[in-house]
Image (spheres, rainbow, N blue to C red):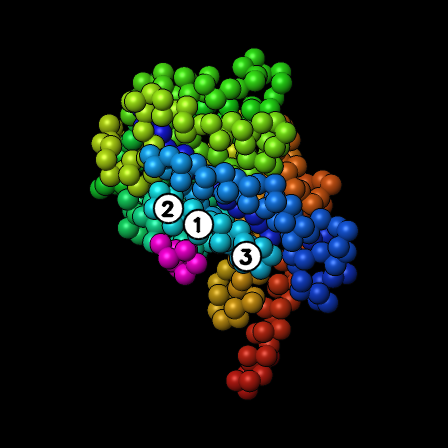
Amino acid sequence: MNICMYFQVHQPYRIKRYRIFDIGRNNNYFDADDQTDLNNKKVFTKVANKCYLPANKTYLDLLNKHPEFKIAFSLSGVFIEQAEEYMPEVIDSFKELIATGRVEILDETYYHSLSFLYSEEEYISQINLHKKKVQEVFGVTPTVFRNTELIYNDWIGSVIEKLGYKGILTEGADKILDWKSPNYVYKANGSENLKLLLKNYKLSDDVAFRFSEKTWKEHPLTVDKYAQWLSVPQGDIINLFMDYETFGEHQWEDSGIFEFLKKFPEEVLKNPHNKFLTPSEAIETLPAVDNLSIPFYISWADTERDLSAWMSNDIQRDAMEKLFRMEHQILKSDDPKLIHDWRKMTTSDHFYYMCTKWFSDGDVHKYFNPYETPYDAFISFMNVLNDIQLRLNKKSQESHEVAGTPN
């Protein structure tokens, strides 16, 4: 069985508790003034020490030990920014992985955003920004794409193919597969050559969500047991896609996750029929067995695997609509700082923190959430948008004054 392992690496610029009296006085939206409060540097440093650095070291050792082992990452642009600012050694550790020649980097939107829901132009701009950043920092040009939170439909496939990508990752959701298996490569419906790699969510989530769950009937999950599961399914490929924070953050070190990881490649490769592939290798070497039509949005979030994590209530929709109504005015400002701040607001996490629905995946919505309630997240978000609007108005007034145009 071919096995493709991909990890999402992302940390947002979380909005601090931005109050109404900050509007017009303070345009520092993301760095908490009170260092005892949750802030982005503290979060990043904590996760880097628990996950990124030890996991990268473990994977580097495994890649050096097992020449057949291969993995892939997607690092959001805002993650890369924070790593450069807070802990450059994290960037260096990813460079070491890439230097092995068996670690693939994928493209996504720079801001890990939901821009595709409102603006194709902004969506493409953020994709191009990400590609440029990856080229500058890591010296590679990705050929495979993963959209924010594996969100996909046929329209996204058409956009991604026009941009020249060979393939795209998404969720192997039951509602789009019906009787089909996620363990094959599919051709995107309506495309010329774009191929789809579908997450096997059952096997992925056994590690990402259930590994340390003591009430799970398969606990403890041993490496030999898991390797047997990977060898049983019918198909051409098993795609194991998960958050990189699985290692050390979601599943703490004392759960045994790193020991599991250290033994994983060797155990899998005991079966001579098993082989590791990067996403681009899978796309190049495995044939598409069928067209797969996905007319509605799917994602890897929660049990519903749709957009409800970000758009299930009025406050989420109101916040998003107000944000994207500002797009053209923002871009016309030609103010790099203002544009960058606005684009940070398009990051999907802000809307995730506003989610009010019940879900069955545990308290994932509380992960590093700086707000006590979804409504607190909404208030801070809307206050920031009001301040951005004031900055826009001031910029416009200054432009009129320079041009000698009466207000």
Q: Indicate the quadrant containing the N terminus: top left, top right, bottom left or bottom right.
A: top left
Residue 151, given in percent of the width and then of the height, sits at 44, 39
| Residue 333: percent from left, percent from top | 51, 70
Do residues under tags 1 and 2 come within 8 Å of each other at their CB atoms? yes
Give the SS element for disc 2.
loop
- What is the CA distance from the residue labelled 1 to the residue labelled 3? 13 Å
Asked whether, in this view, residue 133 is left or right of residue 303, the answer is left
Point out the image quarter for the C terminus. Answer: bottom right
Q: Earlier in the sequence, mark 1 or mark 3?
A: 3
**Which residue was labeled with disc 3?**
88
Q: In the displayed structure, would residue 95 be above or below residue 215? A: below
Mark 1: amino acid: Glu
Q: Residue at x 58, y 83 (%)?
A: 401
The residue identified by callout 2 is: 100
Q: Depth check: 133 or 182 in front?
A: 133
Part of the protein shown in magenta: 131-140
Q: What amino acid is at disc 3? A: Pro
